[in-house]
Image: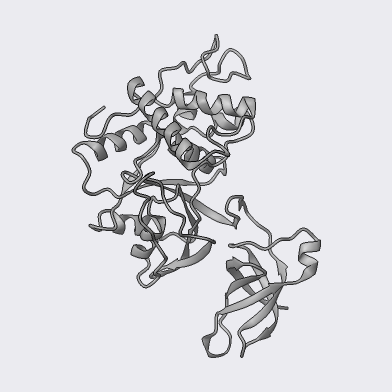
Amino acid sequence: MGEPGRVVAVEANFCRVHLVSPGPEGQDHLLCTARARLAKGGLGICVGDWVEVECIDWVQRRGAVACRGPRTNLLPRPAVANVGRVVVVVSLKEPEPDPMQITRFLVSAEHLDLPVELVLTKADGLPSGWLEAWCERLAAWGYTPLPVSTQTGLGLEALAQHLARPGISVLCGPSGVGKSSLLNALVPGLALRVAPVSGRLQRGRHTTRHVELVSLPGHSEALLADTPGFNRPALPSTPSELVRCFPELRALVHQPCRFTDCRHSGESGCAIGEGWPRHALYRQCLAEVETGAPPSGSGRSGETALRQASRRRRQLQRQGEISPPGLED
């Protein structure tokens, strides 16, 4: 029998395993390779997996992963197994929040059928009413956002309490929203690399290159994972899957629609109608799911994507979906 442990990081052909029971002199981390038979059997190893390690060299702190335990779930991008909750991180400035981008991240998180938390970073030095307006808007979407600031300490204690439950909490969100800065504030001494937002394009710079699990201080079973930022998460593949990823849409289904395959997009006999806050955003997602078209701006330059995002934001402002900075809804 090997020593049981959890994979906390994967790089190239190696993985780091945190052992359940420390070895000689309290050694509890080993650098491991995976047996070839695992790959041949389709049992790849990723962060969060429970494994057994054999052929341990305690002096060199090395070993070999002999087998992988069953998974309760798998976050596909980036690959993290046995996730307990997803924390979607959105910044309130630099870069400014984009309703469609936030919706894509929330939809992709909801699609995993896991608890979803929503954190608003950089909640300091904002125009009057900006934070309140966004919190009200997101509450109408079915979420209770938690504003935080690593500069002032706002909300950090409350966030730590939210994350103190046993299990893996994966932080995901666009580049530049401050995920690494947030973890540095929650885990003193972690010192993850951070970088300022691009001044010209106001886009985040990628600083996280791989996924690694770290323990929340005082809560060894509460594990946090920073993930590489990306800006266009994938949507579900079918309209029925998309529907269940909107909490406010699920809450509106008090009686069945006339047709069982109703798309909730203005059809005759729809019991929901069009008067809910994210209806316009939902229809954009629905159109993409039904046509199978790639996200707008895919394969183009960052400047082109930024211009498209800015144009979409101005359109939503005119439609009343978002308010200009400093204005209430």
Is residue 182 positioned above or below 16 on the image?
Answer: above
Place of residue 211 in the rendered image (x, y in percent of width and height, measured from the top left): 53, 61
Identify the residue at image location x=49%, y=44%. Answer: 231
User: Relative to the observer, which residue lies in front, 304 or 31?
Assistant: 304
> Total marks drawn?
0
Quarter assignment of residue 244 = top right
Residue at the far top in the pictured view: 268
Quarter assignment of residue 79 = bottom right
Is residue 256 positioned above or below 202 on the image?
Answer: above
Residue at the far left in the pictured view: 128
User: Relative to the observer, which residue lies in front, 36 or 316?
Assistant: 316
User: Could you tell whether 306 is left or right of 152 in the image?
Assistant: right
Identify the residue at image location x=44%, y=50%. Answer: 175
User: Relative to the observer, which residue lies in front, 310 or 131?
Assistant: 310
Place of residue 84 in the rendered image (x, y in percent of width and height, measured from the top left): 52, 54
Place of residue 294 in the rendered image (x, y in percent of width and height, measured from the top left): 60, 33
Place of residue 305 in the rendered image (x, y in percent of width and height, measured from the top left): 47, 37
Quarter assignment of residue 127 = top left
